[in-house]
Image (cartoon, grey):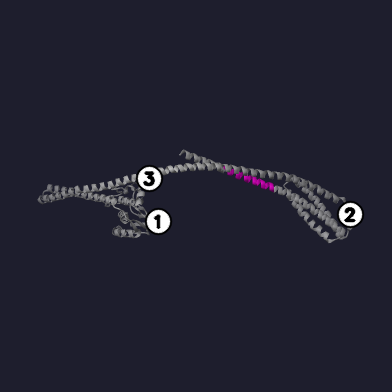
Amino acid sequence: MNNSRSGFFTNLILLTVGFAILAVMAGASVFLAQRAADDTRWVTHSLNVENQLSLLQLSLRRAESGQRGFMLTGDPAYLAVYQQSFDLITPRMDELSRLVADNPEQATRATRLTQIVATKHDELQRITELAQSGDSSGALAIVRDTAGLQLMADFVTVSGEMRQIEQDLLADRSARSLNTSRWLLATTLVGAIALVVLAGIAIVLIRKSNSGLVRAREQLQEANAHLEEKVTERTADLQDANDELQRFAYIVSHDLRSPLVNIMGFTGELEAIRNDMAAKASKDDPESQQIIGDFDEAVGFIKASISKMDRLINAILNLSRAGRRAFSPQEIDLGAALDTIRNAVMHQAQAADATITIGPLPTIESDRLAIDQIFSNLLDNAVKYLKPGRPGKIEVTGSERGGFVVIRVADNGRGIDPADRERVFELFRRAGVQDRPGEGIGLAHVRALVRRIGGKIRLDSEPGEGSTFTVILPRRWREETAEQKAQA
């Protein structure tokens, strides 16, 4: 037991550690993956800034080349090249400004670069317009002015500074991205190794635990084998005791009947003596008449006691015979069987202003006489103990549950107090007001029969509301079913 508990806690600790490692790995992986994504985004950002600088410089160079080619040759093709490049300068400058807006140092240079590009843009535009209007000398004068060369030199300087800053940032961001990737790889490897180690330890412990379970199972099987032998012996002892008890009940009831017959015979003689005394006594003699009256009362009590004793003896004999009777299973249509029983008690039901409703019931394989006696008693009790002044309502319903059938006999009668719900199944015990004939044998007999055919009976009741007897029976009963039920 201690080894089992220790193994359980060890496995629990390993499982907890494994989950903790997985949680740490997951958290670290998510963090590092997010960091790697950020690093990649910033690397891409630096590359985009450099690319935008190159595209802007290319557009300026191509616009300047196209403008000069047109001015020197007058060829419209150069003018088209100039115009295409000229149209790209402003959007590319705007994109560059947007990209570096997060970096104050770069944003300042971008502003300076915007001013240079705008001035260069205006210069190119003036030269082109002069060339298109035929003022070649004016256009050439602007070209020869060193201001244009200085603008391009300033552009190259500022853009070079921006490019250098981005290259430095790119180097730093690339290094950080590489470092993050290494940490991510290391975390994954360490976690994987830890999980493999834990898995190996778990396998060893599981094998050890399985070995213990196999040994425990073998011991349990051995114990079960001895237990089955003891149960078999105990069952045989109980069967012998039950047989002996039934024989004892039969003998006692049989032996009780002999003195009862003698008492009944002497009671008859006493009645004959009383009749002789009454014939000889004078009707005018009060003392004689008083003696005869007392005599009649005593004999009446004796006869009533004899009658009750006779019923009790008959009940004991019936129970004893039922216990000795061999049951034989057969196919029974419960609907038809309960309909027959209902017809038998219909006269009493009508006298009590009661209706008996039988719902759809399944077919079972059981002892027919036992089934008839069980439900005859239940329906008879339901009719007998209806609540006065209220129309009686008795319903029998059934259902199937796995290999069993469940039959409920419900009424709206007097109901049974919770304290009496178990005692009503005891022999010679009754509950409630004793205003109906009976000896307290019926429900005891019912429970004994239900158990004999491998079933159970349960009572649910509310005083003043009614009672429900639930009978659970095996759908197919065999003698071994009842034996297993008794052993359980």
As drawn, the label of residue 400 is 1
Is residue 238 shown left or right of residue 5?
A: left
Residue sticking out furthest to the bottom: 76
Can residue 207 be spotted in the picture?
A: yes
Mark nearer the N terminus (1 vs 2): 2
On the image, numbered disc 3 is attached to which residue? Answer: 228
Mark nearer the N terminus (3 vs 1): 3
Cα–Cα span, label 1 and label 2: 111 Å
Query: Which amino acid does the dot numbered 1 rest on?
Result: Glu
Task: Give neighbour class at mark 1: few <14, some 14-19, many 20+ (Cα, 10 Å).
Answer: some
The image quadrant that residue 62 belongs to is bottom right
Query: Which amino acid does the dot numbered 3 rest on?
Result: Glu
**Residue 159 in the image, given as x and y percentages of width and height:** 79, 48
On the image, numbered disc 2 is attached to which residue? Answer: 141
**Residue 142 in the image, given as x and y percentages of width and height:** 87, 54
The secondary element bearing badge 2 is classed as: helix
Labels 3, 1: front one: 3
Can residue 456 be spotted in the picture?
A: no
Between 264 and 14, the one lying in front of the other is 14
What secondary structure is the stretch in magenta mostly built from? helix
